[in-house]
Image (tube, rainbow, N blue to C red):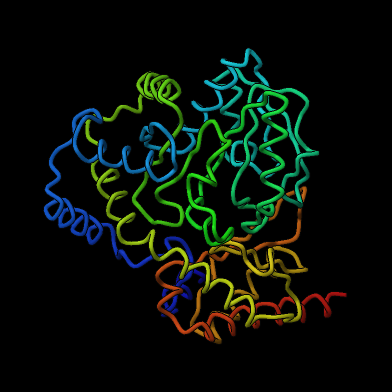
Amino acid sequence: MTGTLRSRCDLDLAFPFHTDGEPADRLERVAAYMREQDLGAEAYLTGESVTRLEARMADLFGKPAAVWFPTGTMAQGVAARIHCAAAGDPRLALHPTSHLALHEEDGAEHLHGLETVMWGEWSRTLTAADLPEAAGCAFIELPQRHNGGALPSWDELAVIKAAARDRGLTLHMDGARIWGLPSAWPGHDWPDICDGFASVYASFYKDLGASGGAILAGDEDFVAEARLWLARMGGRLVSPWPMVPDALRVLDQRLGLMPDFVARAREIAAGVGDAPGLTLTPNPPQVNMMHVRLDCDVETAKAARDAAAEATGVWLGTGFWSFGQDPVPALEIAIGERALAADPARIIAAIRILGEHAAASHSTSG
């Protein structure tokens, strides 16, 4: 029934968030882009596409070098392994909401022999006071996905960087959704943001909507070692088509739209205001995403979403986050081309109806 309801909605805000159409449509777009850019075949990540992509990312982030990976999970595990080995300390410090802690089946421990330790608290962003006294490496996710895309202030981030530098602690940025950061910290460009991090990871499919792939940027020695581990882990693909040229395509097409995506997220949040039955986190949004938190159980939240879809023709999302550490259902809304092209009033109305139905159910059950 849910699948049928979703298909009846003319505005679908669930992943993927952009307008590339069906997989066959995407392949046609990538092929057209390759012809336009005169990009040919790739063999074991040695062709023009990957060379161009890696150079572009190193320059964008202000790092000496960068290397493409087929997945972010592989890239970040390699980064953690390299930094912890260099420090002679197997402890990897993670925020409790880190992707490595929640979604990777303990890969850092099983594949790389690391010991994960938590720093900070689930419900908030990191501070310098949270820094471990010692660890091989500390990961900072910017923005923190499971806190709705929340970020520390620029000054707070600067203090974290300085404190880590003073105690000789290596910082790595989990920048899976890095692309909206300049809008969160006006006046600070990519090299400024990435300064102080020994390495930076970014995803090409999250926010930008490529078909896959990730980048890992850092100094020359770090990237050379990362390439070695890329090969050892089976990531040196014989043909990375269509992921590598697709990453170049979406960078051209969507990176410049990120400020508009962020602005639309803030417009929607302002329109929702203090609607009953829900809380927006963070409010206002700091990047192009937010979480809509509902004071009910997950099944009630799904029913409320369906009611909003029936009333407005807007499908707000498929799943609700709910963890033991934070059992309140949270619907993740990320703004991409679909939401940017839509009337924001429709999205606002759907979110408000979502909250109203959740609140009504809660009061009835109470």
Q: Is residue 318 visible?
A: no
Residue under the point 40% across and 56% down: 208
Q: Residue furthest front?
A: 187
Q: Residue 170 or 343: which is nearer the viewer?
A: 170
Q: Decide: is 286 above or below 93.
A: below
For the C terminus, the quadrant is bottom right
In percent of width and height, residue 51 lies at 25, 36
Question: Which residue is rendered at x = 63% and y = 41% of the image?
Answer: 98
Front-most of 161 and 149? 161
Query: Is residue 240 toward the left or the right of residue 263 in the image?
Result: left
Residue 233 coordinates in the image, percent (x, y): 40, 22
Image side of residue 79 versus residue 98, left or right? left
Taking the spot 70% from the left edge, 80% from the top edge, the residue there is: 273
The image quarter in which residue 224 lies:
top left
Please tell me which residue is depicted at 40% across the width and 24% down the height of the picture. Answer: 220
x, y percent for residue 287:
56, 61
Specify the quadrant of the image occupied by residue 19. Answer: bottom left
Residue with the most extreme top position = 88
Q: Viewed as shown, does residue 334 lie left or right of 65?
A: right
Q: How far across and down, in percent of the image, does residue 99 sit? A: 59, 41
